Amino acid sequence: MDTAYRPTPRTTPTRYRERARYDRETVHRILDEALICHLGYISAGRPVVLPTTHARHEETLYVHGSTGSGPMLAARAAPSRLPVCVTATLVDGLVLARSATHHSLNFRSVVVLGAARLVDDQAEKLRAMRALLDHIRPGRSADCRTPNARELAATAMLALDLVEVSAKVRSGGPVDDPEDAALPHWAGVVPLRLTPGTPEPADDLDPATPLPPYL
């Protein structure tokens, strides 16, 4: 397998092309770290973008939903597969410049384009659900009850092959105009990190229940 995705006209940015990344390692790392993605599709002739959860299994991206949700109904009604755009973004810092127009964000993002299929195979759906749970916290899928037939029937999954993919990364400090360097305004980066806090047990949890090692 190639170590990088092949750029296409749709995955080649028109601005800041130097920020584009196509290597699988970068793309996989961003998708695996991001906890939320946004799914875009066309509904009744209009674009719709919805936040949802996802998980990557090798070169397939699974997107979670319910059987009655808009994108899942659209996928069911599609003659073949549903054209979609899935994005995931991580914000790493606030970039404060001396001039208003040079403020920015340090970020890492991924855009996946393609035609998604509805997952009908029950074994694949279970595998995708386990991947979603382990994406939230590695080891969680083995530490909870397996969905029953009713729950499985109410859950839908879209599968999207990672083929037309690109990442974009912005890092570093502000890029001020040379003539602004002497202005008396603070400039720099405010780093941002998503960090877990102390686990809070459910109100009805047996106090004797041990905290799992993965938490």
Image (spheres, grey):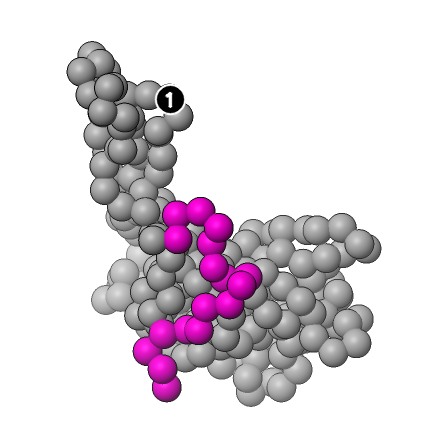
In this view, the residue in front, 49 or 187, is 187
Q: Main secondary structure of the magenta part?
A: loop
Q: Is residue 99 above or below residue 21?
A: above
What residue is at 38 percent from the left and 57 percent from the top? Answer: 20
Q: Position of residue 56 (x, y in %)?
A: 44, 72
Which quarter of the figure has residue 80?
A: bottom right
Is 12 part of what is drawn in magenta?
yes
Is 60 part of what is drawn in magenta?
no
Which quarter of the figure has residue 184?
A: top left
Question: What are the residue bounds of the magenta stretch?
Answer: 1-17
Crowd tier of the residue under label 1, counting other residues whose Cα lies within 10 Å: few below 14, some 14–19, many 20 or above: few
What residue is at 69 percent from the left and 69 percent from the top? Answer: 82
Q: Which residue is mark 1?
A: 100
Side of 11 relative to 134 (left or right): right
Side of 153 relative to 6 (left or right): right
Which quarter of the figure has residue 109?
A: bottom left
What residue is at 25 percent from the left and 19 percent from the top? Answer: 180
Q: Position of residue 128 (x, y in %)?
A: 50, 76
Q: Is residue 127 above or below residue 50?
A: below
Q: Is residue 109 visible?
A: yes
Q: Is residue 121 above or below residue 86?
A: below
Q: Position of residue 132 (x, y in %)?
A: 46, 69
In this view, the residue in front, 4 or 105, is 4
Residue with the most extreme left position: 182
Q: Amino acid at mark 1?
A: Ala
Side of 12 relative to 47 (left or right): left
Secondary structure under tag 1 reads: helix
Which image quadrant: the C terminus? Answer: bottom left
Side of 106 relative to 62 (left or right): left
Q: Is residue 202 visible?
A: no
